[in-house]
Image (cartoon, rainbow, N blue to C red):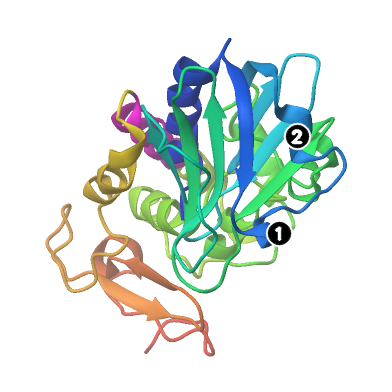
C-alpha cells in the first residue's frame, strides 16, 4: 500500500506535471472506483489544475474554479504517468485500468488496481473535507506543528498496542503497515507495547523515529519517477517484508507475526529483548 512518503512523492511529481495544465478528458473504466456522482467527472474537464495536495494517504488534484479530484490508492492501487496517452478511449475489461485523466498536451495518467479486492477510491468533490476518509484524518506527522508534545497527547490514555495506534489514520495520518514496522524498529520498541505505557523517554524516542523514518523515506523518494516509487520504497525498508533476513542493525533474524489479512515484521534483539512475539491471539511475549 502506498503510504505517506510515496504519496508525498507522487504529489511532488504531479505538481510538476499537472499544475497549470488543462484537463480535457476524464475517462472511467471501472465504474466501481467512483465513490461520488455530484459533481460529475465531466465537471473536471476544460479546467486547469490549480494545485496538487496530500492529505494523509489521499491525493487531491484541485482545479481552478472547479471541483477536486481526490484519490485513495488503497492496498493495490497505483498511478501510472504517460507522456503520451494511447489514441482512443480505453476499453473496459478485466485489466487493472480503473480511470484515465488526459491533458491538453496529450499526456496524462492512469489509475490502476491489481488484484480482486478493488478498494481504489476516486471522489469528485467541491471540498476535500467532504471525503469521509479525509475528514477523519488525524494530524500529519510531518507538519511543522507536530512536535513531541503533540505525539504524547495523542498517545495518552491510548490502550491499544503501538502497531495498531500508529496505523490508525484518525490518530496519525499517513502511516501504514510498512512504515509502522520501520518506525518501531528504529525506536527499538515492541509492536505489542501499549501506547499509553510509554515513559517520557520512550515517547521522545518514538517521536524521533517517526520523524526521521518518514523524512528519510520522503527524501529517498523525491525526484523518483512515479513508476519507480514502489521499488524505491522496498529497497529502503529495513525490516518490513524481510522475514528471515538478518537485521541490518544487529544481525538477528527478522521475524513475523501473521494476521488474517496482513503481517508485521520485527527484530527480536532490537525490539523485544531477544524474545519472539506470540501470535495475535495471545498478544504477549512468549516465555
Q: How many marks?
A: 2
Viewer-closest of 38 and 1: 38
Q: Residue furthest front?
A: 88
Relative image position of residue 189 (x, y in whole percent): 41, 58
Mark 1 burial class by Cα count in 10 Å: few <14, some 14-19, many 20+: some
Label 2 and label 1: CA atoms lie apart by 44 Å
Seen in the image, is 1 located left or right of residue 82? right
Is residue 55 visible from the viewing direction of this image?
Answer: no
Viewer-closest of 32 and 29: 29
Seen in the image, is 176 located left or right of residue 138? left
Name which quarter of the figure residue 257 lies in.
bottom left
Q: Residue at x 54, y 42 (%)?
A: 100
Q: Is residue 43 above or below residue 263?
A: above
Q: Residue at x 81, y 49 (%)?
A: 36
Q: Is residue 151 above or below residue 98?
A: above
Region of the chain picked out in magenta, as a range: 208-222
| Quarter containing the C terminus | bottom left
Viewer-closest of 76 and 38: 38
Q: Determine if the magenta segment contains residue 216.
A: yes
Is residue 85 visible from the viewing direction of this image?
Answer: yes
Seen in the image, is 144 located left or right of residue 38? left
Relative image position of residue 274 (x, y in whole percent): 26, 73
Q: Determine if the magenta segment contains residue 76.
A: no
Q: Is residue 95 above or below residue 108?
A: below
Q: Which residue is mark 2?
A: 42
Q: Which residue is mark 1?
A: 158
Q: Residue at x 56, y 50 (%)?
A: 199
Provide the major secondary structure of the magenta segment. helix
Amino acid at each position: 500500500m502506498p503510504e505517506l512518503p510515496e504519496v508525498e512523492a507522487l504529489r511532488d511529481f504531479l505538481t510538476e506535471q499537472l499544475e497549470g495544465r488543462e484537463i480535457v478528458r476524464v475517462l472511467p473504466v471501472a465504474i466501481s472506483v467512483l465513490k461520488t456522482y455530484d459533481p460529475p467527472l465531466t465537471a473536471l474537464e476544460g479546467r486547469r489544475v490549480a494545485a496538487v495536495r496530500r492529505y494523509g494517504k489521499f491525493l487531491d488534484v484541485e482545479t481552478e474554479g472547479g471541483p477536486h479530484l481526490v484519490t485513495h490508492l488503497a492496498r493495490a492501487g497505483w498511478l501510472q504517468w504517460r507522456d503520451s496517452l494511447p489514441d482512443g478511449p480505453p476499453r473496459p475489461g478485466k485489466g487493472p485500468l480503473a480511470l484515465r485523466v488526459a491533458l491538453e498536451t496529450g499526456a496524462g495518467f492512469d489509475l490502476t488496481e491489481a488484484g480482486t479486492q478493488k478498494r481504489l477510491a476516486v471522489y469528485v468533490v467541491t471540498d476535500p473535507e467532504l471525503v469521509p476518509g479525509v475528514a477523519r484524518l488525524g494530524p500529519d506527522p510531518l507538519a511543522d506543528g507536530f512536535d513531541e508534545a503533540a505525539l504524547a497527547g495523542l498517545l495518552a490514555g491510548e490502550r491499544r498496542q503501538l502497531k495498531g495506534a500508529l496505523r490508525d489514520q484518525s490518530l496519525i495520518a499517513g502511516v501504514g503497515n510498512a512504515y509502522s514496522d520501520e518506525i518501531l524498529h528504529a525506536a527499538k520498541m515492541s509492536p505489542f507495547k501499549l501506547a499509553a505505557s510509554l515513559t517520557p523517554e520512550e515517547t521522545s524516542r518514538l517521536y524521533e523515529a517517526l520523524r526521521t523514518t518518514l523524512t528519510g523515506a520522503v527524501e529517498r523518494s523525491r525526484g523518483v519517477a512515479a513508476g519507480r516509487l514502489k521499488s524505491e520504497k522496498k529497497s529502503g525498508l529495513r525490516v518490513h517484508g524481510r522475514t528471515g533476513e538478518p537485521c541490518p542493525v544487529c544481525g538477528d533474524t527478522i521475524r513475523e507475526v501473521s494476521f488474517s489479512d496482513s503481517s508485521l515484521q520485527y527484530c527480536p534483539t532490537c525490539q523485544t529483548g531477544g524474545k519472539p512475539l506470540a501470535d495475535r491471539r495471545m498478544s504477549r511475549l512468549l516465555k
